[in-house]
Image (tube, grey):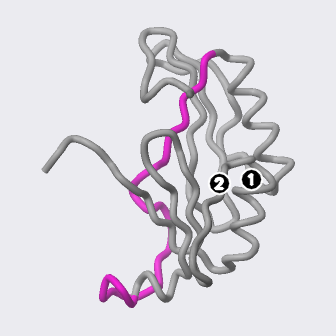
Amino acid sequence: MKPRISMITLGVQDLDRSVRFYEQGLGLPRMESAPGVAFFTLNGCWLGLYGRESLANDVGVSPEGRGFPGFTIAHNVESEQAVDEVMAQAVLAGAQIMTPAQKVFWGGYAGYFSDPDGYLWEIAYNPLFWVGPRDE
């Protein structure tokens, strides 16, 4: 296996609501796609949105899921101010703040929000080193 992630697909309850959140609210660039699915380019990988029940059926598991999913999605930015700006943008888009942006134990600055389906996003500034590809 090559050391990369090609796409993260989120199973969502309401595809139209989630598309609005990510495309209009957060400003992610949406790609053309077939009905019933949405794709966004993320500078090195894609974000996919697919109906939760359809995705569970595709995998062969139950669509029921409760509580902490056991992972978060991180978006690193270039400054503490940028963390605050993205967190504010997410709130305007309909996100719920889970942990306000603040100085964190490892020396950075970060906060968490949840999207309309409860997926957890960390917005972080790491002053020690850059994480991820540089913006194009």
Residue 59 location, quadrant? bottom left
Type of the residue with mark 2: Ser
Q: What is the x, y in percent for residue 114?
A: 65, 54
Tell me the residue at 44%/9% (across/down): 128
Residue bearing the label numbered 2: 114
- Mark 2 lies on a secondary structure that is strand
Q: Note whether 76 is above or below 99 in the view shown.
A: above
Residue 87: image location, x then y, percent: 74, 37
Answer with the quarter of the image where residue 13 lies: bottom right
Q: In this view, does 78 lie to the left or right of 86?
A: left
Magenta stretch holds residue 71: yes
Q: Where is residue 112 in the image (x, y as percent from the top left)?
A: 62, 41
**Residue 130: horizontal and vertical position, in percent?**
45, 17
Which secondary structure, mark 1?
A: strand
* Residue with the most extreme right position: 92
Marks 1 & 2, CB-CB < 8 Å contact: yes
Task: Give me the residue at 75% from left, 72% from top.
Answer: 17
Residue at 28%, 43% in the rendered image: 4
From the image, give the main secondary structure of the stretch colored magenta: loop
Which residue corresponds to the image point at 81% horizontal and 57% vertical from the top-left? 94
Give the numbered dot on residue 80.
Answer: none
Spot the residue most to the front: 32
Q: Which mark is residue 96?
A: 1
Residue 74 in the image: above or below residue 72: above
Disc 1 from disc 2: Cα separation: 5 Å
Q: Which of marks 1 and 2 is nearer the N terminus?
A: 1
Please, what is the three-letter code of the amino acid marked with disc 1? Gln
- Examine the structure image and report whether residue 52 is included in the region drawn in magenta: no
Range drawn in magenta = 57-78
Say few, some or many: other residues with alpha carbon within 10 Å of mark 1 (under 14 / 14 to 19 / 20 or more). some
Q: In this view, does 10 lie to the left or right of 96?
A: left
